[in-house]
Image (tube, helix red, strand yellow):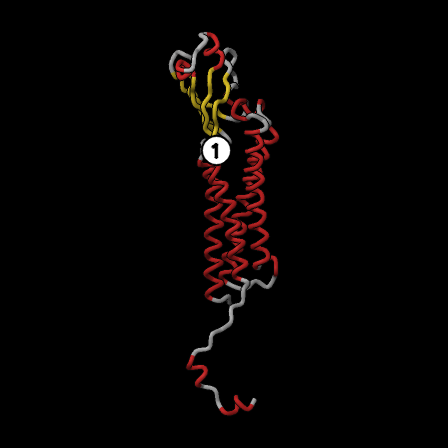
């Protein structure tokens, strides 16, 4: 049976792994990975809008991995609309990269749950196979955190290198053209970053669990030393 200290560490690691998987699920299902301000360039050019008048042509956009919405401001007031990434819009994006991001996160959820199960196992008993012990727990956490990092990095590449926000803003816009004034990563993106950090914390906890601390002898134990013990 593992000691009380190790039980506590593995119980904490199991909780962190479970919370990490929940964070990823919430992040994937919420359409707030990115927000930004979009300028209706066509409308602004038609009326030759100056700086004070550009406010009438600046709208907003937000989106996640599966859906989003925007407010179009083309001089006639704001018009709200919602959209879904699948099945049509994704064809206009970098389809392979977008699907890879989702796949990376799904694999990360799987390894997070595997880590959760193995942490529970190590908190209950000492496994006789190394892959089921601390080494295995470290492996699953490393894989889970690694896939989350791949997903986050891929999403950043899609936004910065493949102009994801601009492509989404101009999807099925036959008359007006929109340009991106500003964009920023939102809560769901940072939830994934927090999830990756959680697995790094788990690796630290598992490393601490392997440290063998010296036992401190109590005064009672020292007083029970007999003459025979001294001879030997």
> Which residue occupies the extreme left position in the image?
77
Q: Residue furthest top?
A: 47
Residue at 46% in and 42% down: 23
Residue at x 47% of width, y 62% of height: 7
Q: Which residue is mark 1?
A: 185
Q: Position of residue 152 (x, y in %)?
A: 54, 38
**The quadrant where residue 100 appears:** top right
**Residue sitting farthest toward the front:** 51
Of residues 64 and 226, which is closer to you in this image?
226
**Who is closer to the viewer here, 204 or 151?**
204
Residue at 53% from the left image edge and 50% from the top image edge: 200
Secondary element type, mark 1? strand
Question: Which quadrant of the figure has residue 56?
Answer: top left
Looking at the image, is 135 positioned above or below residue 232? Answer: above
* For residue 99, above or below residue 75: below
Q: Work out whether residue 71 or residue 219 is closer to the camera in this orientation and state it.
A: 219
Mark 1 surroundings: few (<14), some (14-19) or many (≥20) residues within 10 A: some
Residue 131 lies left or right of residue 78; in this view the side is right
Position in image of residue 218 (x %, y %): 43, 78
Residue 156 location (% of width, % of height): 55, 33
Tally of marks: 1
* Residue 85 vertical placement versus 139 (above, below): above
Give how far across and how far down residue 230 sits, in percent: 52, 89
Image quarter of the C terminus: bottom right
């Amino acid at each position: 049976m593992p000691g009380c200290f190790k039980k506590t560490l593995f119980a904490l690691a199991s909780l962190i792994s479970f919370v990490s998987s929940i964070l990823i699920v919430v992040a994937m299902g919420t359409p707030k990975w990115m927000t930004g301000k979009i300028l209706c360039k066509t409308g602004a050019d038609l009326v030759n809008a100056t700086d004070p008048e550009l406010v009438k042509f600046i709208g907003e956009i937000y989106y996640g991995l599966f859906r989003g919405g925007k407010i179009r401001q083309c001089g006639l007031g704001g018009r709200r609309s919602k959209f879904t990434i699948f099945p049509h819009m994704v064809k206009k994006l970098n389809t392979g990269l977008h699907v890879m991001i989702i796949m990376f996160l799904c694999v990360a959820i799987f390894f997070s749950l595997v880590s959760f199960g193995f942490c529970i196992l190590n908190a209950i008993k000492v496994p006789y196979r190394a892959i089921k012990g601390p080494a295995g727990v470290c492996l699953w956490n490393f894989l889970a955190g690694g896939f989350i990092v791949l997903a986050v990095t891929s999403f950043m590449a899609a936004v910065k290198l493949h102009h994801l926000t601009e492509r989404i803003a101009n999807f099925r816009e036959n008359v007006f053209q929109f340009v991106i004034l500003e964009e920023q990563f939102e809560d769901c993106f940072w939830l994934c970053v927090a999830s990756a950090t959680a697995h790094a914390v788990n690796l630290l906890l598992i490393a601490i669990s392997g440290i063998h601390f010296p036992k401190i002898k109590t005064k009672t134990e020292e007083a029970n030393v007999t003459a025979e013990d001294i001879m030997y």
